[in-house]
Image (tube, rainbow, N blue to C red):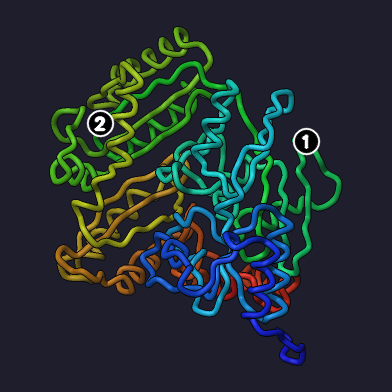
Amino acid sequence: MDTTKRLEPPEQLLGALRRKLGSQAVLIGTDVPPRNCNDRSGSLPRTPLAVVRPLDAAGVSEAITACRKAGLSFVPQGGLTGHCGGAVPEPGWVAISLERMVGIEEIDRASATLTVKAGTPLETVQKAADEAALFFPLDLGSRSSCAIGGNVSTNAGGNRVIRYGMTRELVLGLEVVLPDGTIITNLNKLPKNNAGYDLKHLFIGSEGTLGIITRVVLRLFPKPQSTMAALCGVADYAAIIALLDSARRGLGPLLSAFEVMWPDYWEVITTSAGVRPPLGGRHGLYVLVEARGSDERVDAQQFEAWLEGLMGHGVLTDAAVAQSLAQTQAFWSLRECAELGQVIGPRVSYDIGLAVARMDEFVRLCKPSLTAGIPGCDSAHFGHIGDGNLHLVAWVKGLPVQPKAAMDAIVYGLVRNMGGSISAEHGIGTLKKQWLGYARSAGEIALMRTLKSALDADHLLNPGKVI
C-alpha cells in the first residue's frame, strides 16, 4: 500500500459499509463467527477484524473499496473446505465471505450451461443439473459444503478428471471483482470464443489472489443413463498400467474414474476402520473402475465383456462388479473412507502429481524414507491414478502434533527429484508456498509475481498466498 495516501479509520469505514449493506452483511469484532477464522488446513484459527457478507458483485466492490480506503488486507472466503490455508485471514484483515451469494440463476438447456452465484454449494449445482436431466461432473468429498466459486478459484479436480477434465475445462464464463473494485462481467456461454485474451483463466486456479469470483457459467453434459463399477484386485503395478491402458481402449468415453489403492491404505480401511472388503484375500493393489454411458443394456454388456477379457488374460486376480447403485456407492465409500481420520488420528495429508508410470516407484521410495527419517512414521497411499494424482497420508501414532516439516521435506524432496507437482488439485495457499520452487521454475514464479503486481499493486487482496 502506498503509505503517502491518506488512510481513513477502519472503524468509520466499516460502520459506513454496515449501514450501506445492512447489519447482517458486516460482522465486526466479537460478532465474527468462528467458521470465518480457519479452513480445513489445520492452521491455527485467526480472527479477522471483520467479516463482510455481500449479496452480489456490487457489494463485493463496495467492501473492497472500503478496505482499500483503510489500507486493510482482505481475503475471499467460500465454503472454507480448502486444505492449504488459502482462505485463512490474518488478524487485522477483512474476510469477504460469499456465503450469502447463493442460488442458481439460469439453466440454458440449448447451450447446456448453468449460471450460478459463487457461494453456492457444489452439491446444489449437481442437483440442479440433475433435475434438468443434465449432468455436472465435478465431484468432491466435500460436495455438500464446498462452494462453486472456491472450486473454480482452486481449479478443483475430484473423481472424474480422467473423463471431464479439471474445473478449468468446465467453466465458460465468469464475473470477477478485481483488487481495485472493478467488476468484470463476462458470463460467456460460447464454447468457441477467441475474441482476445481468455481472461477467465487468470482467475481459475489463482486461489483468490488476483480477483474475487462472484458468478460462474458452467458447462453441463448429457445425464448418464448407466453406471457400471468394478472393484478389482491386481498383482502389481505393471498390471495397473495394463488395466488403465485397456480401460482407455476398451471403454473409451465410458471411462469416468480410475482409482487405485495401495495395500497400506486397504489394510487401514478394511481392518482398522472395519469396512467390509468386497474382495477376498490379499492383492498387490486395488482398483475402482467406473464407467458411465447412455444405454444401460449395451453399456453393461460392454463393461462385463471387457472385465471377462481381462480375467481371461490374467490381468486381474479378482473383481467384484456392482449390481446396484447402492453397491457402486459402497465401492466409493472404500475409496472415500470417512472413518480414515478417526482411525489414524492426527495426520498430514498430501496431494501430489506424478507421471503415471512412476507412481509405484514413488510409493516404494517414500514409505521407507518416511519410516527411516521419522521414527514411528507410517503412511497410506491412494489416488486418481488415471489423472496422475497420488494422495498419501502420513502419521506417527500417538503424537498430537505431527512432525509435518520433516514429512514435507521427505515427500516434496522425492516429488522434485521425480519431476512431479507438489499440488495436483488442492492448491498452494500458505502451507505449500515454501515448496513452490520444487514444482515451478524461477522464471514461472517471477511471471506469477508480475501478474499479481499488475492487478494488485498494493498487495491487499489475500497477500502472502501462493507466491
Q: Nearer the viewer, residue 7 or 159?
A: 7
Q: Nearer the viewer, residue 264 or 193?
A: 193
Q: Nearer the viewer, residue 181 or 154?
A: 181
Asked if disc 2 and disc 1 are in contact, CB closer than 8 Å, the reply is: no
Q: x, y (%) of residue 423?
A: 47, 58
Return the residue at label 2.
233
Q: CA distance from mark 2 to mark 1?
A: 43 Å
Q: Nearer the viewer, residue 45 or 425?
A: 45
The relative height of residue 307 versus residue 195 in the rendered view (above or below) is above
Q: Secondary structure at mark 2?
A: strand
Dividing the picture into quadrants, the one containing residue 243 is top left
Q: Name which residue lies at 63% across and 41% down.
A: 169
Q: Give the residue type at disc 2.
A: Gly
Q: Is residue 364 left or right of residue 66?
A: left
Return the residue at label 1.
190
Quadrant of the frame with the C terminus? bottom right
Q: Residue furthest right?
A: 195
- Can residue 207 be seen? no
